[in-house]
Image (cartoon, rainbow, N blue to C red):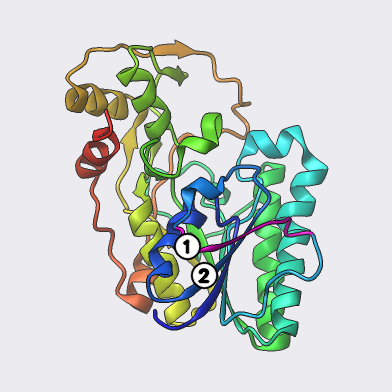
Amino acid sequence: MKNQRVLVTGGAGFIGSNVANRLAADNEVVVVDDGSLGTPANLDGSVAFHDRSVLESDLPTDVDIVFHFAALSSYGMHEAEPRRGARVNVEGFINVVEQARADGCERVVYASTSSIYGDRTEPSPESMAVSASTGYEASKLARERYAEYFAEHYGLSLAGLRFFSVYQGYGGAEEHKGEYANVIAQFAEDIASGDRPVVYGDGTQTRDFTHVSDAVTAAVLAAENELNGVYNVGTGRRHSFEDVVAALNGELGTDVAPEYVENPIPESVYVHDTCADASKLRAATGWEPRVGFEEGIEMVCRQY
């Protein structure tokens, strides 16, 4: 992608800042972020930063492409502030797309979630039935339905990316997320500091861990190909939390045992296993994950 004017909402946060920085070399990039989970320190100096909320009017939506990543991006955040979560995640999405449409923008790439698949040890295709067990999942499903409306009613291109457990580590843009960072980042920081990582349950739960560089490539390809609909972004391989702890200890040369605690998230809504079927995205764009689990762990540990 070159010579485009791009808006990234939530663009000082984890995935958003990685997208903004990737595109900044060859494009004019504008970021909107209210600082909830991001910091302008994550951004390249050439990126124009606006400390604003996606709920505001007169946003800088006179762009060619919108990457919409602004959200209360976890179960815990949404449960703590359900009304704010609904406003930011749903109303904020509608507000940004409406303003962009009025300014002539016809391409939007936005973040959905893989949590809506529930527990799955087999790869989850986009065609399978999904449901909302939490307010967070409901808000992301609402985004997908509104995206369908904007596509059908106005002919816009809107690609929803169902990200699977994206990580980078505290050496990247993830540190500002703190307790909401991916478990790989949190466990690495704990183990490197000599602290026992806290594992919910017995550590057998699994995730399809996806490195942020691959997530960024997926987002850029979705925009370049003017995709419509929803697309999984994941590797198709699962690793348990116990695997993560063992791999981090091996890479760091440590032997820090985890602390197992009762899961504070109700079992009725806790997603124990996730696994992506990314064949739809692969067929549409040629996307392939480039960073495997072992290489990703090594990249996370480099700062230590």
- The amino acid on which the numbered mark 1 sits, given as a three-letter code, is Ala
Looking at the picture, does residue 117 appear above or below residue 66?
Answer: above
- Apparent side of residue 119 relative to residue 245 in the rendered image (left or right): right
**Image point 25% across, 52% down: which residue?**
291
Q: Which residue is mark 2?
A: 29
SS for dot 2: strand
Picture coordinates of residue 55 (x, y %)? 78, 59
- Measuring from the top left, give residue 39's x and y in whole percent: 56, 45
Q: Residue at x 60, y 79 (%)?
A: 63
SS assignment for the magenta stretch, majority: loop
* Mark pair 1, 2: CA separation: 6 Å
* Picture quarter with the N terminus: bottom left
Q: Nearer the viewer, residue 36 or 114?
A: 36
Q: Residue furthest front?
A: 45
Q: Is residue 76 in sight in this rendering?
A: yes
1 and 2 marks in contact (CB < 8 Å): yes
**Side of 164 relative to 54 (left or right):** left
Asked if residue 248 is positioned above or below residue 223 in the image, the reply reads: above
Q: Position of residue 31 (x, y in %)?
A: 59, 62
Q: Is residue 159 positioned above or below 187 on the image? A: below
- Classify mark 1: helix, strand or loop: helix
Taking the image as shown, residue 27 lies to the left or right of residue 155, namely left
What number is the disc on residue 159? none
Mark number for residue 20?
Answer: 1
From which residue to which does the magenta span run?
Answer: 45-55
**Percent of width and height locating residue 192:** 31, 20
Residue 218, picture quadrant: bottom left
Residue 62 magenta-highlighted = no
Residue type for callout 2: Val
Taking the magenta stretch, the answer to whether it contains residue 53 is yes
